[in-house]
Image: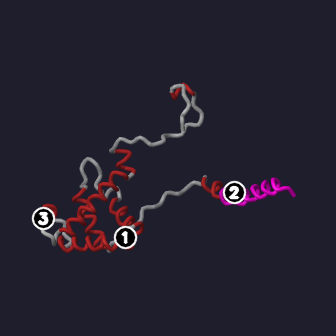
Amino acid sequence: MKRRELIKMISLSTGAVLSIPLSNSLLTACKKVEPVKETVFTPYFFSDREFSFVREILDVILPKTDSPSANDVGVDQIMDTMIGTVYSPDQQKSFREKFNALTGYMDFRTDTSKIQQLITSETEDDKMARNAFLDIKQQAVAYYLTTKEIATKYLNYLPVPGMYEACIPLESVGGKAWAI
C-alpha cells in the first residue's frame, strides 16, 4: 500500500469517527425544548437569611421605577449562582469575609441611612464592609444591564452579528458582499 493511500484512509476513518457523535447531537438539536417551569430558587453560596439580605440590598441599589427592580429580573439569583459556582474557592473566601463585615455592620437590616453612612465612612473598620457593598453594587449593575429583559426592552439593542437571512438580493445590502 502506498503512503498517500494510507494517509487518505486514516483521514477518512478519523473523520468518520469524529462525525458520528456530532451528527447525533445535530439530530437532537432540532427537538422542541419545553420551557423551564418557575421554581423556588435554592441559593448556592448564601444561606437563606443572607440571600434575603442580598435581595433587600439589591432593592436599595436598583429599586423598581419605570423599569423593573434588580430582583424582578433575577439579579439576586445570577449573583448567587456566579459567586457559588464560578468564583474560585479563594475568591469565595475573600467575598465571604467582606460580606460578613457588611452583614455585621448592617445587622442584616437595609436602613438606607446606614448605607449612606457606610459609603461616606472614613474609618478603617468599615473599609471591608464598604468594599463588600461596592462589590455587590458593581455586580448588581453589571448583571442588571445584561439581563435579557433590560437589554432588549429598556436599552438600545442591536444583536450582533444580526439576524440571519439566507437568501437576500445583493442590492438590499448596498450591492456589496459582506467581508466576513
Height in image: 34 above or below 162?
below
**Where is residue 41 drawn, in percent x and y?**
38, 67
**What is the distance, in whole Å, between disc 2 and disc 1 at their CAs?**
39 Å
Q: Which mark is residue 121?
A: 3
Could you classify mark 3 by the number of other residues whose Cα lies within 10 Å: few (under 14), some (14-19), or many (20 or more)? few
Query: Which image quarter holds the N terminus?
Result: bottom right
Could you classify mark 1 by the number of other residues whose Cα lies within 10 Å: few (under 14), some (14-19), or many (20 or more)? some
**Where is residue 77 drawn, in percent x and y?**
36, 63
SS of the residue at dot 1?
A: loop
Q: Which residue is mark 1?
A: 43
The picture quadrant where one finds residue 139 is bottom left
Which residues lie in the magenta part? Answer: 1-23
User: Is 98 or 31 nearer to us in this picture?
Assistant: 98
Label located before the other in sequence (1 or 3): 1
**What is the distance, in whole Å, between disc 1 and disc 3 at their CAs?**
31 Å
Query: Residue at point 33% right, 44% down?
Result: 155
Q: Look at the image and tell me whether residue 40 can be seen.
A: no
Amino acid marked by disc 1: Pro
Height in image: 178 above or below 107?
above
The picture quadrant where one finds residue 126 is bottom left
SS of the residue at dot 2?
A: helix
**Where is residue 22 drawn, in percent x and y?**
65, 57
Q: Which mark is residue 19?
A: 2
Query: Residue at point 35% right, 70% down?
Result: 91
Label located before the other in sequence (2 or 1): 2
**Where is residue 51 drawn, in percent x and y?**
30, 69
Which is in the foreground here, disc 2 or disc 1? 2
Could you classify mark 2 by the number of other residues whose Cα lies within 10 Å: few (under 14), some (14-19), or many (20 or more)? few
The color scheme shown is: secondary structure
Which is in the foreground here, disc 1 or disc 3? 3
Query: Residue at point 40% right, 70% down?
Result: 88
Amino acid marked by disc 2: Ser
